[in-house]
Amino acid sequence: MTDIQRWIIHLTRRPIKEFVLHIWLDERYKIPWCLFSCQSLHHLELKCCWLKPPTTFEGFKNLKSLELSHVTMTQDSFENMISNSPFLEKLMLFNLDGFSQINIHGPNLKVAHISGEFEDISFENTFRLVELTMYLDYGCNLVKLRGCSSNLLRFFVHLPHIQSLEIHHYFLEYLAAGVVPIKLPTPCINLRHLSLCIDFDDLKKILAALCLLKSSPNLRKLEIIAPEELTGLLTSTSYCWENIFSEPTMPIEVRHVRMHGISGFKSELDFIRFLLLYSPVLEKMIVEPDLNAKPELLTELVRFKRASRQAEVIYNVENSS
């Protein structure tokens, strides 16, 4: 029996509310079964561990916060833990392995941060979720569709009260799979903050981004990030934006916009131009150029028409990527 195991056994004999274990070993540390009987836990945080609960395990009945980083477990064990922890409010997942399909059932879940390699993800009975951050690593074998014509439609069905949404790395590619609607059938009326990582050379990703903008009537803060790995690789792709933005009279109710890593290519400038043209209550747009941005970028920005008379465009080179 290892010292770590003795320590865990000793702790779990008491009604502890918080358990944090970060292991730095060549192999994942197998968590002893006694931890799964600790029903007093409110917060559980594990790093570099292997979880294999006993067959009698039926979740943590008082758990409110769960963070798993570089953890190995089966899909059944993961789903059993999440769905049978009825008071779980905060879920942080970083680079899980052992399964590639993430299914989350959390009636009391309010905050979720999910990062790593996976093929598909679904939310069920997560109607209280208000803050969501999604990171999808490059090279994942994305499942394009699963019983639905549109990943965008399926993804937002169980997120009616989302207030803050961050979509980074390659997750927008996942959402753009299948049919990209002009708007979501049910608008995200509570969404106040939206952060998107967009490849401006990919029309479907641009359409997916516009769909989210058109479906967020109460959006206040918008952040657009150009992927660093694509910096300098953008082409002079030109789209017919009048056709893309098929409802030009529909305003975007955003007040503050931050554009990061902009190089000055036409597709990026067109996106900025349309934001300025159809954001009547815009107060401030901060443009943070890429280090290799085209010298005429600032000149182009100044020329763009603005729907909002009070809109201020700030060219911020200090935070350039």
Image (cartoon, rainbow, N blue to C red):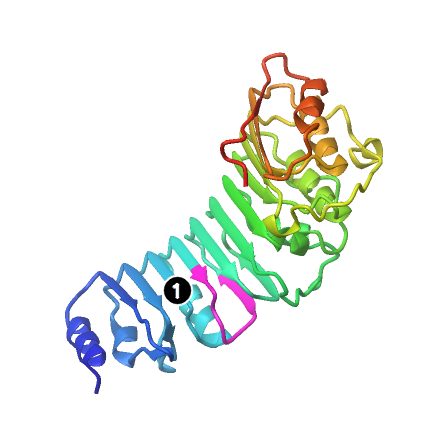
Q: Look at the image and tell me whether residue 203 can be seen.
A: yes
Q: Residue at x 83, y 31 (%)?
A: 242
Q: Residue furthest top?
A: 309
Mark 1 neighbour density, 10 Å: few (under 14) some (14–19) many (20 or more): many
Residue 45 x, y percent position in the rendering: 32, 63
How many marks the image carries: the answer is 1
Residue located beneath label 1 in the image: 68
Q: Residue at x 81, y 33 (%)?
A: 241
Q: Residue at x 35, y 56 (%)?
A: 87
Residue 202 x, y percent position in the rendering: 75, 48
Q: Quadrant of residue 142?
A: bottom right
The answer to whether 161 appears left or right of 224 in the picture is left
The amino acid marked with disc number 1 is Leu
Q: Which residues are magenta?
A: 93-104
Residue 99 x, y percent position in the rendering: 53, 74
Q: Quadrant of residue 250?
A: top right
